[in-house]
Amino acid sequence: MRVTCCVAFTLLFALVAAPAQALRCDGRLISDGDPKGRVLSHCGEPTSIERRVAVRRAPAVRLIEGRLVSGPAVNLEEVTIETWLYNFGPRRLMRELRFENGRLVRIERLGYGYHK
């Protein structure tokens, strides 16, 4: 009975927990895939922004018999990368958010913030 209770509690916690890469701003959850505008409206202006453009090989995707089939990477694509830093002060961890082509792709926890 005790084992069943622990398993049930663990499953419940897993269902309620936030995604691994998530950030709570203004009571709302920010996570991978969110557009820059949504993050900006809930989290406000970041402490700093770094921008760069990278060129990557993109997989060649073809439609064969009604299915998308990816082949060797032959196409080149430009990707706009922005890294936003949020400093929430000395009592909270800073966050680094990475956007690619306007979509959030990664949230990293950094050390504790500092006085602004």
Image (spheres, grey):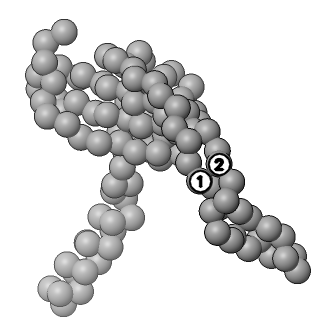
Q: Which residue lies most toward the front here?
A: 74
Q: How many marks?
A: 2
Residue at 25%, 72% in the rendered image:
9
Q: Secondary structure at mark 2?
A: strand
Residue 82: x and y in percent read 46, 30
Assess whether mark 1 and mark 2 are in contact (beta carbons under 8 angstroms).
yes
Q: Secondary structure at mark 1?
A: strand
Identify the residue position indicated by label 1 in the image: 57
Above or below, comparing residue 115 to residue 39 in the picture: above
Residue 51: x and y in percent read 46, 24
Which is more N-terminal, label 1 or label 2? 1
CA distance separating discs 2 and 1: 5 Å
Q: Is residue 91 visible?
A: yes
Residue 27: x and y in percent read 39, 32
Question: Which label belongs to residue 41?
Answer: none
Residue 59: x and y in percent read 65, 61
Identify the residue position indicated by label 2 in the image: 76
